[in-house]
Image (cartoon, rainbow, N blue to C red):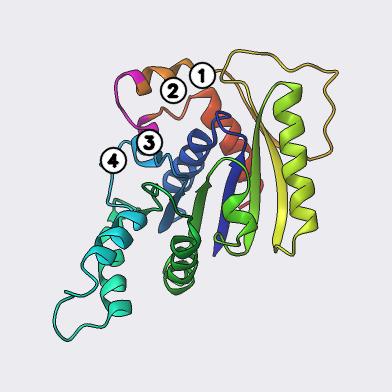
Amino acid sequence: MLKIGVAGKGGTGKTTISGLIIKFLLKNNKKPVLAIDADPNSNLADVLGIPQPKSLVEIITEIEKIKDKLPYGIEKPKYIEMRIQEAIKEEDGFDLLVMGRTEGPGCYCYANNLLREWMEKIEKNYKFIVVDNEAGMEHVSRRTSGNLDILFIVSLYDKISIRTAENIYKMINTLEINIKKTYLVLNEFGGKKINSKIEFSLPVAFKIPFDEEIYKLSEENKGILNLSENSPAFKEVEKFFNNMI
């Protein structure tokens, strides 16, 4: 099993990168894939072009409201497990599990723990797992994502974004998190070219060029899985993974 995490500053294109990775895996018959949307914004389904499934947080909220009226003879943990199983969106070659957004005050502690426990149960059923993390390192620092074989930290071509990526990497090194390899992904979606004066210590996995086809698909409400194999962005991801797996 290969477990991949994608993290970085908000607005850097993490979810698009996650979608490109999933597209590569499916195109090369690297499946089954479990895609996990651990970002509260929860738009991985939109990027992939599939209906949005019910989220883990929604399930927890619903169960808490009826916790004294659960179906007769079913204990709460078993009922939660049944509901989460129903929430996994099954597609051709991959499944999607969405973390979701909390409503009102509160934290993700219970949802985080539940997601981690559930992942430990089901991950053995998949050859590849791709986790689209929220902005920053919340899920990684809480170990919600579990151990990772590869972590991609996505950054735009500007000093502030790259500095944030470096800070995320430094934080990883202060925590006892088992991440085998960490890479920087430089995203050029905004049309900016790399500034050669910007320095960074992380190895670069790939540089995503401006790709008009990705924007066109987004405007047409079509998923990135419809992206052509001639896409410059897809070719960059493909080139890296062809040498990796």
Who is closer to the viewer here, 68 or 212? 68
Which residue, as the protein is rendered here, is positioned at the far left? 72
Image quadrant of residue 227? top left
Query: Measured along the vertical axis of the image, is residue 204 above or below residue 26?
Result: above
Is residue 204 visible in the rendered structure shown here?
no
Q: Nearer the viewer, residue 27 or 92?
A: 92
19 vs 36, nearest the viewer:
36
Image position of 231 with respect to 49: above or below:
above
Mark 2 residue crowding within 10 angstroms, few (<14) / some (14–19) / many (20+)? many
Residue type pointed to by label 4: Ile
Q: What is the secondary structure assignment of the residue under circle 2?
A: helix
- The magenta region covers 219-226
| Alpha carbon separation for disc pair 1 and 4 | 21 Å
Residue 130 at x, y percent in the picture: 50, 52
The tag on residue 214 is: 2
Marks 4 & 2, CB-CB < 8 Å contact: no
Where does label 3 land, which residue?
225
Mark pair 4, 3: CA separation = 10 Å
**Residue 225 in magenta stretch:** yes
Q: Which of the numbered marks, if any, corresponds to residue 1?
A: none
When the figure is inspected, residue 235 is found, relative to residue 1, above or below; the finding is above
Does residue 245 belong to the magenta stretch?
no
| Residue to which mark 1 is pinned | 211
